[in-house]
Image: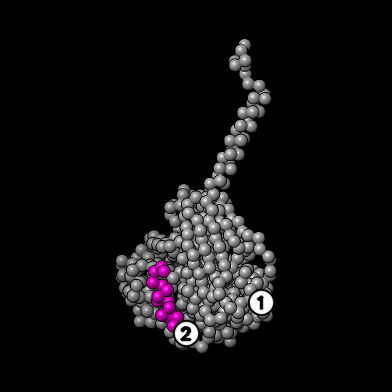
Amino acid sequence: MKDDDKPPSSNNNQKLNLDKDLVSKRKWRDWHEREIPVKIEGQATREGMTIKISSKPLTTELSIAYPNSIWQKYRKENKVKLVDNVSYIFTAHLPFLLKGNIRLDFNTGYPHVYSWANQCFMRYLPAYWYLYHKRRGTSVFPMLKTLLNSNVNFSETEDEPPLFPETIDENLILPFTFGKDSLLTYHLAKELGLKPVLIFFQDPMDEGYEGKHKMALFKKFSKLIKDKTYFVANPLGNLREKGEGWFGWELACTSWALLALPFAYHHKAGYLVYSNEKSVNAFFYDDDGLKVIPDYEQSAQATEELSILTQALSEGEVYTTTFLQGLNDLGIIAILKKRYFDKTFKFLMSCWSEVEEGKNKRWCGNCSKCARLYVYLTANGINPIKEAGFKDNMFHLSKAHLFNVFGQKASGTGWDAFGLNTEEQILAFYLTYLRGNRDPLAKRFVKTPLFKEAKQRFNELVEEYYSLHEEYLSPPQWKKKIDRIFTTTLKEIKKELFDLRKG
């Protein structure tokens, strides 16, 4: 037998296996050699912060400035830590937006917010998939792969812990949006004898008409109240996905919490108060059995996580909380009507005002948020057009696709598109009908099976959406007063609703 005809020896087999291993390792190296570097430089400036991004897919430089002397009086050590965290929180989502295997290279130190940001990304993966309607792959897996394969490098910096003055519990920082929840939080804080400082983050600046309308409201509201108010234009928000995309927006509350710390320092504020209500804890399971939480960052668990973050960056002085975790939307609007009507509805705005219809009106009349708030207002006996600034009747038949009670989930990609508020809308339409509204969609609702369901389940639905539910986030020193205000007010409202049905 010739040597060429001999079977390969065990040594040859080992050599072949070794070659395969080398090929495998080379492919592994190739994957990482194909990383696209994105250089991110965060820097403190005289008035605030700058983030500069340099890469093939994206090159830009954006800055944020603080009003008055807020930034100048913030300690140097605190600025360093804040720049570390702000630089990351506004760019952490870039691997989802930029094509390829992204490596983020920061000139800043390892941020406190790193683990929290990735926790949010993981929690949002099923919701991303639901929102993007299969535009990002065939399942959640491609986005998970992007998250796990992307790389982040931070620079070595001296670790100087932040220093904060002793804060005062009664001094509050309120990120203010003119939504129903923000308005109730403000009015409640005033009734409790607290001292709220309102911050309006115009975020981002160049998308839609929301900022224009809210700026006008902000000027009027600031003149009406005696509390300190601040306006902060935030160009850093332009790094988030545009249009109906969500990448970057899942960390909006976290970014506001970070940006608010210099204000808390200046005013010795012991609390940063968000307005996260009960519905933000809602979830469902998708077809793959994955838990979808549309508003995870505003959930009770996330609020507690944010509090740990703000405490870590303030020497344990600034807590993050909410007063509204026990309330649903219908109950919130009812309380606003009952206790704070005059300083509420002429300033109310929940519309994103992204479409052309919103150019000259604060309620665009062409989105599910307008639809939802419209029916919640009419359910509580408030005229949206005469008393809340609407220009459009949202009960025309052409608006049916914006609601969740007419056989399909609300169109669009916002929270309503998940269909989780269907039962609340059922009750809202039923109450609207009981109050005598006979507009086309109110009459159409009567012909649906849901009208009968609302009638049969009326007491149950009223108890769910007009009661104070158990929660653990309200600060203990004020919880009894908060609960008493909500409980006594809602008790009166429920009596009125039961009387309305009898009539």
Mark seen at residue 164: 1
Q: Nearer the viewer, residue 299 or 266?
A: 266
Mark seen at residue 350: none
Packing grade of label 2 (10 A; few <14, some 14-19, many >=20) is: some
Question: What separation in Å lies between label 2 and label 1 (alpha carbons)?
Answer: 28 Å
Q: x and y percent of residue 199 in the render?
A: 52, 78
Name above or below for residue 64 compared with residue 125: below
Question: SS of the residue at dot 1?
Answer: loop
Q: x and y percent of residue 304 in the render?
A: 62, 68
Name above or below for residue 205 compared with residue 166: above
Rendered residue at 53%/56% (across/down): 38
Magenta highlight range = 206-219
Tell whether 7 sits left or right of 252.
Answer: right
Residue at the top extreme of this rendering: 1
Query: The residue under label 2 is which amino acid type?
Result: Ser
For residue 382, say whether it is visible: no
Q: Nearer the viewer, mark 2 or mark 1?
A: 1
Question: SS of the residue at dot 2?
Answer: helix
Is the magenta region chiefly helix, strand or loop? helix
In what quadrant of the picture does the N terminus appear? top right
Query: The residue under label 1 is which amino acid type?
Result: Phe
Task: Give the image quarter of residue 399.
Answer: bottom left
Q: How many marks?
A: 2
Rendered residue at 55%/75% (across/down): 46
Task: Give the image quarter of residue 119.
Answer: bottom right
Q: Which residue is mark 2?
A: 222
Tell whether 241 sits left or right of 25.
Answer: left
Packing grade of label 1 (10 A; few <14, some 14-19, many >=20) is: many
